[in-house]
Amino acid sequence: MSFIVLGTGHSVPERIVTNDELSTFLDTSDDWIVRRVGVRERRICTKETVVQLAAEAAEKALEMGGTKPEELDMILCATVSGDDIAPSLACAVQEKIGATCPAMEINAACSAFLFMLETAAGFFARGNIKKNASCRC
């Protein structure tokens, strides 16, 4: 059984923190960080919530895929950084985008994305869903 990704979306916090900025209060440098992990900057939430970012990304993915929230059969979110323990990020995104389908969070750090894909594949294979929204936050 296979499935097709109809759309993708992303959203990032506004605040950018560079390696040079980190080096003003940590014993590090841009060169040291780049050589070890390849990162030059990162985004930090200062006013955005994970729910806002995930919902914005979901809305972009739905638009790209030509899908309305009410057409979704399931929402899966892979994360370890939700705003709250309950309700889950998936349920909060479901409400924010106006979907009425079941929503489930997969909280498994880096491997959560793989677990999310396998979970979606299982639901598709059993014929339980036709359109699924999945996000990694």
Image (cartoon, rainbow, N blue to C red):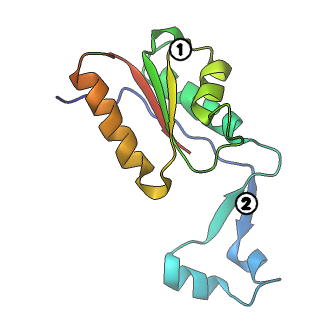
Q: Earlier in the sequence, mark 1 or mark 2?
A: 2
Q: Nearer the viewer, residue 3 or 32?
A: 3
Q: At numbered mark 2, what does the secondary structure look like: helix, strand or loop?
A: strand
The amino acid type of the residue labelled 1 equals: Pro
Q: Is residue 92 above or below residue 136?
A: above
Q: Which quarter shows the C terminus?
A: top right
Residue at image point 71% right, 70% down: 18
Disc 1 element? helix
Foreground disc of the pair 1, 2: 1
In this view, 21 is above or below 114: below
* Residue 71 locus on image (x, y percent): 45, 10
Q: Give the residue at mark 1.
A: 69
Left or right, 4 with respect to 94, comes to left
Rendered view: 53 above or below 98: below
Q: Please provide percent x and percent y for residue 92.
A: 66, 27
Q: Which label number is shown at residue 16?
A: 2
